[in-house]
Image (tube, rainbow, N blue to C red):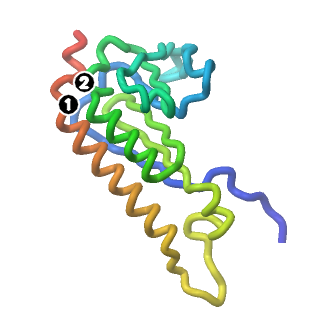
């Protein structure tokens, strides 16, 4: 039996809020010097430049880089509470996290740890002649859903600062 193996094992979270974020902001794993350069994204057939942001959290900067189309307006969005929560999540899950804030949605990609992919075959991979329940997968799901809950709590706490009409 042939076929190709999936290139991504993990979860993609989409969190929707009742108001829009100011501009577009991405948090990605730190990649050395490349993380200090602007990013370009295509959104609604327009190319948007995301400039690197400096975050006042030394440990956070070792693992994440932040880029935004409106860096000056992101103080409330990329708050100390958010950076601390993401740093703790990174340390707990021990995986790379990717986040983006566009419109009224936050998107979060959480990769299933590569060492667990080798052990389990990946999330929800069926096992023949054994239990379908695997502790590592349940723990990962629990931790990822806890991360989603923390993101929602932190972002809702600071949402007065990231209201779209504040930029106008």
Q: How many marks?
A: 2
Nearest to the eye among marks 1 and 2: give it.
2
Residue placed at 65% from the left, 69% from the top?
119
Q: Quadrant of the N terminus?
A: bottom right
Tell me: 162 left or right of 136. left
149 in relation to 50, above or below: below
Q: Are marks 1 and 2 in contact (CB under 8 Å)?
A: yes
Residue 109: x and y in percent read 49, 45
Residue placed at 77% from the left, 58% from the top?
4
Q: Within the image, what quadrant is residue 164 found in?
A: top left
- Looking at the image, tell me whether mark 1 or mark 2 is earlier in sequence order: 2
Residue placed at 68% from the left, 64% from the top?
118
154 in relation to 6, above or below: above
Q: Nearer the viewer, residue 140 or 165?
A: 140
Residue placed at 53% from the left, 20% from the top?
45
Q: Nearer the viewer, residue 119 or 106?
A: 119
Mark 2 highlights which residue? 76
Mark 1 highlights which residue? 159
Q: Nearer the viewer, residue 90 or 75?
A: 90
Q: Residues within 10 Å of mark 2 (few under 14, many from 20)?
A: some
Residue 3: x and y in percent read 79, 62
The local secondary structure at tag 2 comes to: loop
Real-space Cα distance between discs 1 and 2?
8 Å
Name of the residue lying farthest toward the front: 58
């Amino acid at each position: 039996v042939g076929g190709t193996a999936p290139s991504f094992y993990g979860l993609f979270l989409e969190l929707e809020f009742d108001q829009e974020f100011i501009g577009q902001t991405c948090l990605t794993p730190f990649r050395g010097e490349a993380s200090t350069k602007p990013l370009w994204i295509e959104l609604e057939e327009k190319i948007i430049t995301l400039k690197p942001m400096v975050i006042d959290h030394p440990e956070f900067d070792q693992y994440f880089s932040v880029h935004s189309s409106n860096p000056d307006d992101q103080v409330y969005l990329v708050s100390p509470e958010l950076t601390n929560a993401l740093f703790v999540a990174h340390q707990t899950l021990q995986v790379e996290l990717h986040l983006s804030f566009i419109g009224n949605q936050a998107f979060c990609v959480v990769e299933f740890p590569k060492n667990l992919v080798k052990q389990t075959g990946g999330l929800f991979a069926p096992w023949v002649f054994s239990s379908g329940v695997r502790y590592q997968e349940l723990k990962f799901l629990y931790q990822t859903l806890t991360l989603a809950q923390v993101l929602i709590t932190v972002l809702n706490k600071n949402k007065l600062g990231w209201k779209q009409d504040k930029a106008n």
